[in-house]
Amino acid sequence: DAGKIWMTLVGAFAVISTQNSTVNSLASICQGMAKMNMMPQIFAKTNRYHVPWFGQVFISTAIFIFAAASNDSSDAISFLILTGSVFWMISYILAHIDVLIFRRRLPKAPRSFKVPGGPVIPVIGIIGTAYMVLNISTDPKERMMIWLLTGATLVILGVYAFFWIRYKMKMP
């Protein structure tokens, strides 16, 4: 019984610390983007403790909506985690592509770290991550739904980014 209580406490603290880190880091990222005019300026606002309050409320609300949408179903939570994982893996693929492009365009640029092996490691990273995205679930129907939700999210963010950059930032 003592072990069950201890593991319950450890699990609860792990969830709380992860949630805290997620909310705070994403709010800070939104604040930085707002300062660079990449998001609405309300995300840059801070309270008297220099906390980006709007970002924290926004992120917390989004997490609450996802939790409510899961309807206490472990399958729904698993689906949302897998969808988020695909979205995150796509960002890693884009980061690998960025490394390859910057190596080609700016080979002499100073950098604090140079990926060893030339383009081999980024290419292996792209292939491995693409393999994980393509095989995110053993159920073909769930896999397709994950891809559709990820694709729809990317389209929505792409449209937002297009209009924000074009009309708010006034960049071509």
Image (tube, helix red, strand yellow):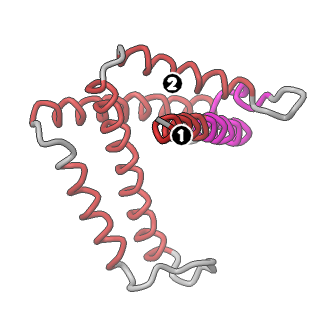
Magenta range: 20-45
Along the viewing direction, whichever of 125 and 107 lies nearer the viewer: 125
Q: Amino acid at mark 1?
A: Trp
**Upstream in sequence: badge 2 or badge 1:** 1
**Residue 63 - label:** 2
Along the viewing direction, whichever of 15 and 140 lies nearer the viewer: 15
Query: Is 26 covered by the magenta stretch?
Result: yes
112 relative to 91 in the view: left or right: right
The residue drawn where x is 35% and y is 14% is: 71
Q: Residues within 10 Å of mark 1 (few under 14, many from 20)?
A: few
Q: Residue furthest right?
A: 48
Q: Position of residue 4 (x, y in %)?
A: 46, 36
Where disc 1 sits, the SS reads: helix
116 relative to 164 in the view: left or right: left
Q: Position of residue 119 (x, y in %)?
A: 36, 78
**Residue 6 - label:** 1
The residue drawn where x is 22% and y is 45% is: 136
Instruction: Kindly report the distance in space between the C-alpha atoms of the residues bearing marks 2 and 1.
Output: 27 Å
Q: Amino acid at mark 2?
A: Ile
Q: Measured along the vertical axis of the image, is residue 151 above or below residue 131?
A: above
